[in-house]
C-alpha cells in the first residue's frame, strides 16, 4: 500500500507494512525487533516463564504497549491474556484468570510473563506483540507451549541426584574418621606392648586429637541428619 500527498509543499510516501517512511526524498526505517522462544516445555503445577524481548529504535515511553495472546491447539480462535501500557493488565476472564503475572522490564527490553499452576489445557500457541510509537511495525513471534505431567522417572532421578550430593560428602567424612580411629588404635596397641610412656607434650597432642575426632564425629552426625531431612522433604 502506498500513499502520497503534500503538506506545506513537502511530498511524502508511506509504506506502513514495511515500516519505511519517505520524507523529502529521505527514507526512514521504523524498526522494532521482537524475539521469543519457539518452544517451551513445562510441568503441571510448576510456574512457567514465557520469555519475550524486544529492541526498538525509539526510547520507551508511556505509549508503549505489549499484548500477549493465546491460541489453543488445532484452533484459529485467539484469546487476549495480557495487556501492558504503563501498568500490567492480566486477563480477568477465561482459563488464565488470576494465573498470568508480569515478570518483564520494558526499560530493559523485556516483555516476559509467567503462568502459575499450569495444566494440560494450557498447551497451545502464545504470541507476543510490542508497539513503541513510532515503532509499530514488527514481527510477531510465536511460542509453542507443551505442558506435561512429571513422570516417576524424572522424580526418581531428582531424588537420586539429591541423595548423591548429600550422601557423598558424608561418606567421605565417615571414611576419614574411621581411618584416623584405626590408626590411633593401632598406635595405642603398639605403645602398650612396648611399655612406652607418653611425655606431657604427647599427652597434650592426644587431647587435641581427641577433640578433633569428636568434632569429626559431630560433623558426621550432622551430615546424616541433613540427609534424612532432605529425603523426607522430597517425599
Image (cartoon, rainbow, N blue to C red):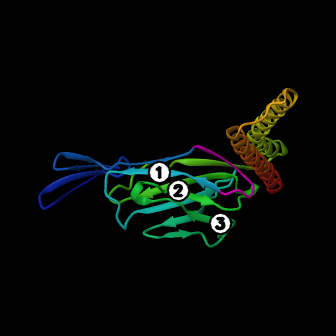
Q: Which residue is mark 3?
A: 99
Q: Is residue 112 above or below residue 199?
A: below
Q: Are marks 2 and 1 in contact (CB under 8 Å)?
A: yes
Q: Which mark is residue 185?
A: none
Mark 2 to mark 3 CA distance (whole Å)? 14 Å
Tag 3's secondary structure?
loop
Indicate the position of residue 81 as horizontal and vertical percent values.
59, 64
Indicate the position of residue 6 as horizontal and vertical percent values.
18, 58
Q: Which residue is mark 2?
A: 112
Say which residue appears at 71% left-offset and 58% top-offset. 118
Indicate the position of residue 185 as horizontal and vertical percent values.
84, 34
Q: Is residue 87 left or right of residue 8?
A: right
First in residue order: circle 2 vs circle 1: 1
Other-residue count near label 1 (Cα within 10 Å), few / some / many at <14 / 14–19 / ≥20: some
Q: Is residue 142 above or below residue 201?
A: below
First in residue order: circle 2 vs circle 3: 3
Q: Which mark is residue 53?
A: 1
| 150 falls in the magenta region | no
The magenta segment: 38-47
Amino acid at each position: 500500500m502506498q500513499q502520497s500527498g503534500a503538506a506545506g509543499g513537502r511530498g511524502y510516501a508511506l509504506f506502513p507494512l514495511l515500516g519505511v517512511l519517505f520524507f523529502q526524498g529521505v527514507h526512514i526505517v521504523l524498526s522494532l525487533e521482537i524475539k521469543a522462544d519457539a518452544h517451551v516445555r513445562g510441568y503441571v503445577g510448576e510456574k512457567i516463564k514465557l520469555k519475550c524481548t524486544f529492541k526498538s529504535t525509539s526510547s520507551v515511553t508511556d505509549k508503549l504497549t505489549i499484548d500477549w495472546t493465546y491460541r489453543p491447539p488445532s484452533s484459529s480462535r485467539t484469546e487476549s491474556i495480557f495487556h501492558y501500557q504503563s501498568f500490567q493488565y492480566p486477563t480477568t476472564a477465561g482459563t488464565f484468570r488470576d494465573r498470568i503475572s508480569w515478570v518483564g522490564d520494558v526499560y530493559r527490553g523485556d516483555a516476559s510473563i509467567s503462568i502459575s499452576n499450569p495444566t494440560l489445557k494450557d498447551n497451545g500457541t502464545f504470541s507476543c506483540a510490542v508497539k513503541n510509537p513510532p515503532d509499530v511495525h514488527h514481527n510477531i513471534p510465536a511460542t509453542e507451549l507443551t505442558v506435561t505431567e512429571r513422570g516417576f522417572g524424572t522424580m526418581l532421578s531428582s531424588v537420586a541426584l539429591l541423595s548423591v550430593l548429600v550422601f557423598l560428602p558424608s561418606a567421605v567424612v565417615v571414611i576419614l574418621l574411621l581411618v584416623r580411629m584405626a590408626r590411633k588404635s593401632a598406635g595405642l596397641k603398639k605403645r602398650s606392648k612396648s611399655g612406652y610412656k607418653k611425655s606431657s607434650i604427647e599427652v597434650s597432642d592426644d587431647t587435641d586429637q581427641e577433640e578433633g575426632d569428636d568434632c569429626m564425629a559431630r560433623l558426621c552426625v550432622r551430615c546424616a541428619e541433613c540427609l534424612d531431612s532432605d529425603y523426607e522433604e522430597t517425599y
